Amino acid sequence: MKQHQTSPILLGLVIAVALTSLTWSAHANVYATNIKINGSTNSPTVFAGNSIAISYILNEPASAGVTIGILSGSTVVRSVAVAAGNPGTLRGANTVTWDGKNNAGNPVAGGDYSCSITARSSGYTVWTKTTSDDNPGNQIWEPWGIAVNQNTNSFYYGRLFVANSYPYTGDPLGFHKLNADGSPAEEGMLSDGGYTWTGAPYYESPFRVKVGPDDRFYALDWSGNGVVMSWDQQITPASLLNVMTDYNNPGGNLGGFTVTGTGANRQLWMADDTTSGYGIIRWDIQADGTLASGDQGTQLMQVGSGSGLDDSAFDVAVDKNGKIYVTVEPGSATYMIMRFPAYAGSPLTTADWKADNTSYGDGNGDNDFAIEVDPTAAYAAVARSDSNALLILDANTGLTITNISVSNPAHAVAWDNVGNAYVAFDVSGAQSLWQAWSPPGTNQATTVALETLHVLPLPYITSISRTGNNVTIHFTGPTSDPPSAYVLLSGAVVFGITNNAGATITGSAGSYQAALSTSASGQFYRVKRP
């Protein structure tokens, strides 16, 4: 088992964190996920100068290093480069400790700060597998679905889900939840979501899985004609929603599906695996996350009759421009893969392109079980069963970019948000696997954590006055502090000051006074928040 390394690194940085965003490049494979501040996803409040731990997970080593950028608004307060091979650039868990200081070595001023983590890789010359088949997290008995959270505004950004549709010792029906490096999710790896999966009749319960732009996890039970459920990102039973029921099915055998949009624009798309059937159907998802009772959707295209869809649809994907990608019933059509224009209200009749026939690619039609398009709409990934391969196509032309052998029948595909392709495949009579494959080329990706770090200013003495033996020290502090939050230190030498228990501290709303009586001729004073 590959061990995940927790690697502390001490940096003189100020840190804090705002809305997650990510800079995507066409070839980007290493990125930071699971960012936490002081071990938590809550936004902490600290005094300037206090140490803060920033942790994150890298899906693979940052072979060209990591840069941590600290911002106050849009201004970079500190930029710290960590060279490749050092703690902070390792595959798995990394931890960086900030000492609360700025570029000048002084405690930062009070305020809110944000932190970005940019991971870079020198990349590869060809498509390269970046996961280990020996990692237990990459092993699953019967994987029929795989999905990755692409939502940069989610605390679960980068989380991987794999559906297991055949029960085996230690690997029950349901789902595996994994971090981007293949380690188990913090709350546990396995969940069935409180739903009764059957595995029947052909290891299709559960079947396909997706993570919607709404940050819900969706799964299909294809033991009947196809129903869809959704959960939160931990797949807790209490979050289960019956999105689509049999009452939403117009009579098809609904298998492959996808989910698009957020809020009022959420839509469910499904492929009907019925000859001369419904082709592709789309529904609007209600505000409560389910389909309206009796809503049987809108038919976008029909098998045959000049529709351009050669046979019953097996899987469907939709890119960011609304273009529709379809695979058809394995082994039964002239063309197995095709792309259609975005639906504009009229039934679709002509495909933009078609691929995989007897004169294309490997020379014969394949069982193309699943299709998914990357976030940039540049590539389409296809799981091929007959040729045991992960096929990468140019999404604009349908031409082959690469056909990666995985040595076993491929069942499901996915993309993450930075350009890695994922494939799940069946190893007959043994633990099956999922793998991640990186495209060639150097790359980088920037993740901004979701937490905001609220830095409170240090107490600041504004004046000292003396009348006889009575001394009054005026100072400022955070407006939320009571006077009991402070102590006064004093002494005849600057490096020998100690707690002055005789001081009385009063005030509120950021303005405070420390009063004491002393006969000493001269004293040094410091206000401290213990």
Image: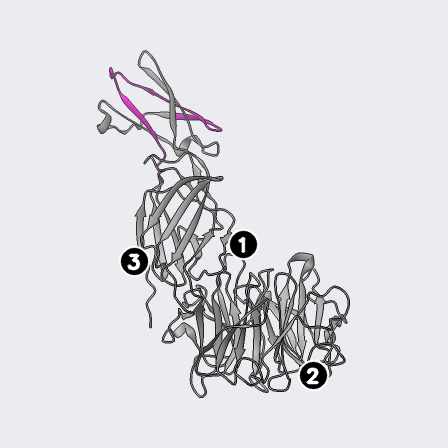
Q: 91 or 460, which lies in front?
A: 91
Counting residues from the start of the chain, the first of labels 3 and 2 encountered is 3
Magenta span: predominant SS is strand
Number of numbered discs:
3
Residues at badges 3 and 1 in contact (C-beta under 8 Å)?
Answer: no
Task: Give yes or no for residue 507 being in the magenta stretch.
Answer: yes
Q: Which mark is residue 320?
A: none
Amino acid under disc 3: Gly
Q: Which residue position holds label 1?
A: 153
Determine the CA span between mark 2 and mark 1: 38 Å
Colour mapping used in the image = one colour
- 71 and 438: which is toward the camera: 438
The answer to if 54 sits in the magenta stretch is no
At x 35% / y 38%, what residue is drawn?
Answer: 101
Q: Position of residue 194 (x, y in %)?
A: 57, 72
Q: Are marks 3 and 2 in contact (CB under 8 Å)?
A: no
Around disc 3, counting alpha carbons within 10 Å, would you say few (fewer than 14), some (14 to 19), or many (20 or more)?
some
Residue type at mark 1: give it: Asn
Question: Is 418 rendered above or below residue 255?
Answer: above
* First in sequence: mark 3 vs mark 1: 3
Q: Which residue is mark 3?
A: 85
Range of residues picked out in magenta: 505-530
* 419 vs 127, nearest the viewer: 127
Q: CA distance from mark 3 to mark 1?
A: 29 Å
Describe the element under mark 3 as helix, strand or loop.
Answer: loop
